[in-house]
Amino acid sequence: MLVEQIRQRYLETLERMEKAAQRTGRDPRQVQLIVVTKAQPLEVVQAAIQAGAQALGENYPEEGVMKIQSLPEAKRVQWHMIGHLQRRKAELVIQHFDFFHALDSLRLAQRLSRLAQEAGRILPTLLEFNVSGEASKFGWPAWEEAAWPNLWPEIEAVLTLPGLAIQGVMAMPPLFENPEEVRPYFRRLRRLFETLSQRFPQAEWRHLSMGTSADYEIAIEEGATMVRVGQAILGPRPPKQESK
Ligand SMILES: *Cc1c(COP(=O)(O)O)cnc(C)c1O
């Protein structure tokens, strides 16, 4: 049965997370598992909730909202928006999601903050950085550490926005056949996180969102407090529908 299969992989993932934390002397309770349900059909998302998932990650706002509105169980879990967000879809995140991982511009931040204030809420948000220099990746450019200070003015402006609670950083590093090769990118994000915490003590820097099915154990060894795992728990994603 689908629920049992997912439960088994979910518990196995939690166990591997716990071991990875212990290997580096960390408290496993400091690491949250976000089950990435993007592109999965409703019955799989429902099964994930029934299997015990407590936080779900979606990449596309409309798809996430459809699932949130269709599932009676949706209120039992936290919904994390983990994908790139276009400004015109900001309202969907404010109305439906609990947490946003992928803030990547001041203009988007200004819009989200204004909409959040209008809705009477504060959106917990992470800053996304591109730590590899790959053109396909979103996020503020952060692959050259010597150029980090160029980012400070914009980040400082983001931190003044009243509708957002900036709580940390996120990145989507390259995929390697050998997951060990990703470690330097996780370390870079961790250094950036530490630099930001020192430089901008006005924010509460709590979260490092990094690591997917391919490399979450390494991410935890390098300090991740949130890992975003899809396929290792839910199986392969069905092929994307051609949009009309
Ligand atoms: C798809 C996705 C994930 C999860 O990837 P899996 O390979 O399914 O574990 C994590 N983070 C982001 C931003 C994603 O788009």
Image (cartoon, rainbow, N blue to C red):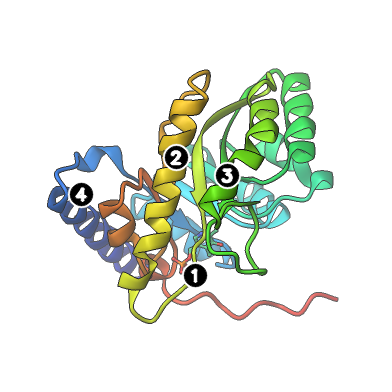
The residue wearing badge 4 is 21
Return the disc, 2 or 4, that comes first in the chain's sequence.
Answer: 4
Q: Amino acid at mark 4?
A: Ala
Q: Residue at coordinates 81% horizontally, 45% vertically from top-left? A: 87
Tell me the distance, in whole angstroms, between the alpha carbons under discs 3 and 1: 20 Å
Under mark 2, the amino acid is Phe
Compare marks 1 and 4 and give the one earlier in the sequence: 4
- x and y percent of residue 123 in the render? 61, 29
Q: Earlier in the sequence, mark 1 or mark 2?
A: 1
Q: Dot 2 lies on which element?
A: helix
Which residue is disc 3 drawn over?
148
Q: CA distance from mark 2 to mark 4?
A: 19 Å
Are the residues at dot 3 and dot 1 in contact (C-beta closer than 8 Å)? no
Residue 213 at x, y = what percent?
A: 38, 67
Q: Are marks 1 and 2 in contact (CB under 8 Å)?
A: no
Cα distance between the residues tagged 3 and 2: 11 Å
Mark 3 vs mark 2: in front: 3
